[in-house]
Image: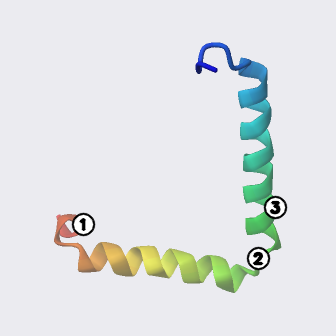
């Protein structure tokens, strides 16, 4: 099966399902967990010299 023969509405349906699952995962997580992930990203950007400019 080629990518062109794959129905587009199934792709959109799958993207909606995955985005809803991601939203529910983050919304069910506590705010401390969200801040933890944000702090990890900030820490990594500080360690990365390209993020210093």
Q: Are marks 3 and 1 in contact (CB under 8 Å)?
A: no
Percent position of residue 21, x then y: 79, 56
What is the spatial separation of the Cα atoms under label 3 and label 1, in whole angstroms?
30 Å
The answer to which image quadrant residue 11 occupies is: top right
Above or below, 9 against 26 in this view is above
* x, y percent for residue 53: 17, 64
Residue 47, how many percent across, how many down?
A: 25, 80
Residue at point 59% right, 19% down? 2
Residue at mark 2 to residue at mark 3: CA–CA distance? 8 Å
Q: Secondary structure at mark 2?
A: loop
Tag on residue 29? 2
* Quadrant of the rendered image containing residue 24: bottom right
The residue where tag 1 is placed is: 51
Which element is circle 1 on?
A: helix
First reached walking from the N terminus: tag 2 or tag 1: 2
Q: CA distance from mark 2 to mark 1?
A: 28 Å
| Residue position marked by numbered label 3 in the rendering | 24
Left or right: residue 22 compared with residue 34: right
In the displayed structure, 26 sits above or below 21; it is below
Which residue lies most toward the front here? 1
Outermost residue on the top side: it is 5
Mark 3 crowd level (few <14, some 14–19, many ≥20, 10 Å Cα):
few
**Residue drawn at x 74%, y 18% as measured from the top left:** 7
Q: Nearer the viewer, residue 52 or 8?
A: 8
Q: Position of residue 30 (x, y in %)?
A: 76, 81
Q: Element at badge 3? A: helix
51 in relation to 14, above or below? below
Upstream in the sequence, badge 3 or badge 1?
3
44 left or right of 13?
left
Q: Is residue 12 above or below residue 8?
A: below
């Amino acid at each position: 099966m080629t990518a062109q023969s794959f129905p587009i509405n199934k792709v959109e349906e799958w993207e909606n399902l995955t985005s809803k699952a991601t939203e529910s995962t983050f919304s069910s997580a506590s705010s401390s967990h969200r801040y933890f992930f944000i702090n990890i990203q900030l820490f990594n950007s500080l360690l990365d010299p390209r993020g210093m400019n």
